[in-house]
Image: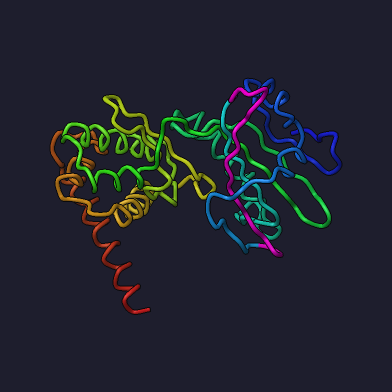
Amino acid sequence: MTSGPQSGVRLLYRAPAWQERLTRAGLQEFGDFWDLQLEAVDEGNSGRGQAGWSRVCLHPLWVDGALLGRLVIKRQSNYFSRDWRHPLRGRLTFEKELANLRRYQQAGIATMEAVYCATRQHNGSRQAVLVTAFLDGFISLEEQLRRWRDQPPPRRQRDLLLDAVAQLVANLHRQGLEHRCLFPKHIFVEPASDNPQVRLIDLEKTRWVPWRPARRVRDLTALARRWPGLKPRDALRFLCSYSGHARLQAGDKQLWRAVAQRIRAKRNDRSLS
């Protein structure tokens, strides 16, 4: 970690492979990213601090008429996450996401490519910028499922994607990690591929969970609840790929019963509220 030439800036990461492209595009310092006039891709988040907010934007790198790549630029101010290491003041959630991104890469869990990350203290606010490379050729699993609903794919193509997603989630859990926000919109896939690649995004809530059943049940519940029209055959295929078994074993069935029970409990809680 080093301080940059701009006052109050703490540089956390800059990818060497992107340095030349960023320089040519005039994006070298915190303020260069912060001052870009960009439209947010969604409503973003607010709260967690004094007038705290967090936004995600897309930015194409055009230099002399050539597209050098696309970036996902995430900016936030006073948007904190508290944990046992930072119980009072908290830390900016993008700091935590960068740490988790590195943890995923070291563990061999497919995710985004970090490009730049820095924080700064400015006019009484704590701000952060996290930049990653846009996942060209990928769409969210949420979008893929929407397309399949309108135009069902060949069975083999569907099974290949189910296998790829299940194996990525299984790898995550083998490493002792729980995503804690494992929704179809946070899983990115290659559409119509015979060897589909899968990536996990939105890593700020990831944490290490020593008790294996807990991390499995919570993540799989989150995924199953938000998987529209999840058919029993697809659930069976997913579980077999996740467990690495040709047929479900007693432990696999117990896991799915725990997931189903948790889903029912959440539905009951919602109906009572």
Asked where in the image residue 244 lies, by quadrant, the reply is: top left
Question: Is 27 one of the magenta-colored residues?
Answer: no
**Residue 190, horizontal then vertical, whole percent:** 36, 32
Q: Quadrant of the N terminus?
A: top right
Please state the total of marks drawn on the protein image: 0
**Residue 248, horizontal then vertical, whole percent:** 15, 42
Magenta range: 49-67
**Residue 132, horizontal then vertical, whole percent:** 58, 35
User: Up-down: is 88 above or below 18?
Assistant: below
Q: Which residue is outermost to the bottom?
A: 272
**Residue 195, horizontal then vertical, whole percent:** 29, 25
Is 253 placed left or right of 18 in the picture? left
Way the structure is coloured? rainbow
Asked where in the image residue 262 lies, by quadrant, the reply is: bottom left
In-front residue for pair 272/215: 272
Is 224 placed left or right of 17 in the picture? left
